[in-house]
Image (spheres, rainbow, N blue to C red):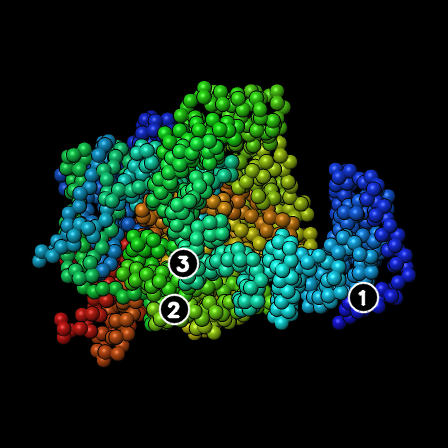
Amino acid sequence: MKYALTYTLICAAAVFTGPAMSSSFLQAGETVSAESAKPTMDAEAFTAALDEIDAKAAKDMPGALEGWKNMLQTAPLSSSQVASVCAKMVDGTLKTGDSAVIADVVETVKETNNPAALANLAVKLASVKNDPYGKDVFEVASVLSFMPSSTEKNAALKTLVEGLCSVNEKYFDLAAESFSAIEQDLTPVQSAECLASLAISGWKTCKNAFASEEMFERLVEVTEDQKQGTEKQEYRKCGDQIIRVLKVYLTLNKDLMQNCLDMAEAVLPEDQLTLFKFGSLGGAALQANDIRTYNAIQEQVLAMPYGKLRADVVTMLIRSADNAKASKLLQAELDNPDITPDEKFQRLGDLRRRCGAVEWYQRGFCDQDAYENWRRLTDEMIALNDSVQGEKPARFDFFRQNAWTAFGYGDFAFAEQQIEKALELNRSESMDRAAMIYLWKKDASKVSSLIAEELKTCEKAEDRLFWRAVDFFNAGGKAAEFDAAFAEDKLDSKAKLLALRRVSELFYRAKRYDVCHDIYQDILNNRFISLKPKSYEVKYVPNAPKTADSFSRTAMYNDWDAMETRFVPYGDTLNISSDIDVKRLLKDAEQPQIDPAWKTGIYVAYDMEGVHIYVRCNDPEIEDVILGERSGGSIECIFRPNDEAPFNMWFFSNLPTAKDDYNVEYASPTPRYRLTGDMFERDACTTPDGIVMHTFIPWIAFYDSLPEDGKVWYLGLQRWCPGGGQTISGQVHELARMLNLKFNISPEQEKEIKRNLCIEAFNRFKNSKTLPIWKGDVELGDPAFYESELAPLVKELNEAGEKLSDADADIDALFKEYMPQWAEFEYTVAEKRRDYLKKKFFE
Amino acid sequence: MGIKFSLMLLFAALCGIQCVQAANVPPRQTYPLDPEAVESNAARVAQDLAGVDAEWKNAPVLYYTVEPMSDIKRLPDLYPEDGKLAAPLDIVAAKGEFEPASFVVYPKKNVDQFELEITELKNKEGDVIPVSQLDLKLVKIWYQCGSGWFGFMADPLGRTLTPELLLNDEKLILADPSTQDNYARYSNADGSTNYEWISADFMVTNYQFTNMVRIAMMHDADTLQPVVLNRDEFKQFMLTVHVPDDTRSGVYTGSITMKADGEKVGMIPVSVCVLPFTLPKPATNYDISKPFMIALYGTGDVQDHPNIIKNLVNHNATYLFGFPKLNPKDEEQFAKEVELAKELGVSLRPLFANGPGVHQTVYGKEPNAEALGKLNLLEEQLEATAALCEKYLGHTDFYCYGVDEGGYDTIKAERPAWRAAHAAGAKVMVSTRDHERMLYSLDFMIMPGMPSKERAEKNRKFHEAHPNGLVGWYANPHSGPENPDYFRRINGLMAYKADYDVNSNYAWYRNDWNDFAIAYESNYRGLIMVYAISDRVLDTLAWEGVREGLDDVRYATKLRQLAQEAEESGNVDALLIGRKALAYLAYWDSRENPDTFRMECANYIMQLEKELHKEQN
């Protein structure tokens, strides 16, 4: 232990620093009492001044420190204001970890001689990790301890004890000793509060059951003294502290809780004891799924005489009980012959909440009887309410909520009846549900009159706009006319958007979907930036570079104009939150930009073999990547050859390697989808400017969806790097905004590509691995199958393939008829084999 | 919007489609058709008619049998390339197996009430497979996110027609082409019905959850109801046959009668070849004595829904996450749930995601008092849980769940809790990346990423480090893609061949009806395999695919068992057939056709049975 912080030493330190401190203390003591008569700073001005310094602190800590000190020195502050300023100053400066600044702060606080500020400072200093300010804690505590007795000092000492004891074992000891020294100055309740904190920390902080029990025992003694006394309020407050400790032990150490409960049982007020033994222990049993214990408690509760205590226990238990258990307790409460109408109404309401889930959104399976139960109990509550003479137990919100739930379950007439009652009792607060129901009824005049009434009293500008907007659509207004209709309001685009959204939600609830569609389309088409996908013209590059490295050594590498560079910071996604709508999607939103140092460009080229995708990723600190300081980031790509096809996905998980840690395919291998892993070739390299990645897609991968006749292919790409996430195509996996790749393949090129493809596919067929087995391996194959199912097809495909060597062959016709058959021959064989065997089973 | 799509919408409008909300009565379900496709389809159908019996030439409704688990996204204007016009619906199934078949109908005129009536299936001896074991459903096409059929991430600007739901009542859901939206028929408390918009995204509802579906108000019929047919619009149906365990092997025949507005317009012959064997429970590829399982997130909280549990079991999903719930403090409830589980066929060893969670973390060298208290409590809970499990089930094979997707530091901090589980005889499971040696004390690693050959090596190493350990997979893809072929493969042979033990994808069910607005996760599509309504879950193509995937593994397991028997039989002919079969299994590649795989397996199984049990034969 670097500093022996015991109470004895604090006293010694006080002696050592005695004269100066006592002088300062005396002045302070006088000041404090004198100040109480002085005018102090207005609360609002005080808060504003403090906020101003707070704002400054983020950028200019020395300036802020000066500000706090100035306030302390010059502003007419009350004692509590001094404590607040000190607290802000301590919190702000401790974050810096600057020992000189903190030393300055410690001195400043000490000079205030404000007990609360000193206590707070000591606790905050003690709480800093690794205890670098132990000496200061010691000194500050000593200053506080030698101040003359006062209410403020006692409260501060209590703060000190309660704060220090929860820091660590060392400070727990200091707190305990401090408490012993000051106990005689504290009120019994203050003592009980300190002892409760010490008892809790004894276990929670120090794992010391002995110390905990010792403190608890002292707490019980203090309480017992009060039990004998005349101050019943004080006695109950001490009892509260016992319960506080027991509740904490209940969660941490049940044995300790039980020992302490045994100690306290004879001392605690009976009702507090019962509430704990039944309510708290029962609730804890429920939370721990300890149904055995709970059942035993429940039995005792149900045997209790009716009355407030039992009702309070039930209220505690039902907080943790499932619906069945809560219902049992509540039903029993309802059997109380002396229950008052108010109590009965309350209990029926509790029971109704436990009759099943009737919320609008339920995540799990259906609770089929929920609404029927709810309605039965609601009817009972209404009958009870109607039977009460004078002040009724039901308030407007009961009817309002009834209308809401009933409407949600399509109990429309009842919903209307209930909302009318709610409107009678509190029109303004029932407006939202009422508008929903009358909009659903298409009772435009009723909606209008309700809104007119509301506007007479509604003061909040946002709400006034909302109701006027509702009435606008209620009267048949269209979203396109909204701006003109509300021109005088001079609304900005955000206000309009938020108002329209709120209106849309209400009309959705009212099942007026036509209005919602109108608003939705208006927002999407007129208020948002264009969300159309970008297009890129693919370049024809004969014998295009076959690797990232070879690309980086061509003029293409620096030809940014030929690249697709319109990347935006990731996050411009629809349907995520209002915040994104406002900050990214509204037309006048200030669009965030990519840091130019991390520029990204896509260059797509095709040749007779296929398509090459090169991505140049600038990285201003590429040396760090080369030297292994950090990864070069990653790239996530998807590709789709038409808008009904599955998409291929591939990653460069850890640039500059081309490794893909994900290996995901989003479709299965069939004649309609070829695996990314089989078809896409990838590589990457570093350059002095960053990283280049390259992907090659051979034509044969998508021979059935060639980008001829104006057809486009689609590419999605996101880059993740220290410069931030970038996207060219919206959200990951978003297909609707993939970059459109436009080709301009000449007829000659198309013919050559198709010829090459036919030859490649024919060779694939010729090299079939399975065919020789089926045909010629009597044991492993099945010559009969071959002869009946495959031979004619093989003959036809061979004959067609021979035509390919003819320079005048009709390539288009061969491509159309035979390309799929050659390319997918193995799939065809599998299908024929499946059918052949199936047929055999039926024979 | 492309020109093609505009034309479709125009065509749809000309067909008289009305906005659903405008008239609150069920409008006729029609879909947008591409006029070019309609013309081309008609020509192709006419061509196909040349090859079938004359009786079909003038039939108002034709049908094609198609592969039920195909990856083809069967849309109303898509000619069934793989279909066979007017062919019998032939099904091959083992005893006890559920097996699907499918057909699409092609109407040459509008039909208001198209009905399908299926007969029982009979063999020559007069044995029957009763109608109660034949489940006919409509495959409902509705709108899903732009990445529908393929992806699990949201694609908010796209909407695509997607076949998915297996319904009895077509009118439960209406897809409205005029706005590309879905509507659900709500049965209101006042006895009326209305169509509720269930595909509004969060922008419509101001980012509130108002656009979620209230499942209590949705009811499907118990049997297939009449549907509408619109001229030129293909419509798909699914027949699932359950062959009772005690069915005699052989061929059973029956038929499905097609009726259009009360008139019989055709008959589909149905034949089921019941194979002479039953299928075992699936075992792993790398060790035939270890079970290959499916235990999905979202299968808990089923204790009050026996029919939902039955649905899971009938799809080979006999291991549920958290059911029956091990709670030593509520033994009565556990006993009740165990009884229910036994009655319904739920596997009770091991129990997954059960017992107390083992997510308590201890950072630093030793736990503070609070952590220590929690650990002590955990130890007590684990001991009591183990005792309960032992008492009712005779084992302590239960897996407690750790911190979901925790990083290395979290895993390190969980070790004391995991140790407590092991001390009690329990095991630990959690979703995690493959942190290699750092996972030494984990028993069941649920690793993200589709089962691929690249992950097989990771699995092999995990098994080497954990001789009794399990490897499962989830995510990439999560649930969501509707393609049944894809889900069949990744939950079946792909996971099997990559030496996984468990399919543990996220998730089987949560209320994700609205594909365009997923609560708390708007960047995703609905991550589910089934949809709940008031009293049951609705099956989907993907969920049927999962069952078939597990059945593929059951065929492989059966074959492997017989091959092993052949090895030890002393019968050289049997041994060599067994070797051929094993070689077939070993070299089967995930690119191959799983239907063919199934037939080859059945073929080998029967050859082996014949050879091994010659004397009995």
Q: As rendered, which of A426 and A92 lies closer to the eye?
A: A426
Q: As rendered, which of B455 and B185 lies closer to the eye?
A: B185
Image: B486 above or below A523: below
Label 2 or label 1, whichever lies nearer to me, is: 1
Residue on which the image places disc 1? A10
Q: Mark 3 belongs to which amino acid?
A: Glu
Name the residue at 39% across, 54% down.
B301
Q: Share a chain, discs 2 and 1?
A: no
Mark pair 3, 2: CA separation? 24 Å
Name the residue at 45% across, 71% down.
B383
Name the residue at 42% across, 58% down.
A300
Q: Mark 2 belongs to which amino acid?
A: Leu
Relative image position of residue A402 (x, y in whole percent): 42, 35
Q: Are marks 3 and 1 in contact (CB under 8 Å)?
A: no
Q: Secondary structure at mark 3?
A: helix
**Residue A781 seen in the figure:** no
Q: Mark 1 belongs to which amino acid?
A: Ile
Mark pair 2, 1: CA separation? 57 Å
Q: As rendered, which of A261 and B518 lies closer to the eye?
A: A261
Residue on which the image places disc 2? B388
Which quarter shows the N terminus of chain A? bottom right
Horizontal arrangement in the rendering, residue B128 relative to residue A213 (left or right): left
Relative image position of residue B583 (x, y in whole percent): 32, 69
Determine the chain carrying the residue at label 1: A
Q: Share a chain, discs 3 and 1?
A: yes
Determine the chain carrying the residue at label 2: B
Label 3 or label 1, whichever lies nearer to me, is: 3
Q: Secondary structure at mark 1?
A: helix
Q: Residue furthest bottom?
A: B570
Residue on which the image places disc 3? A299
Relative image position of residue B39 (x, y in whole percent): 29, 33
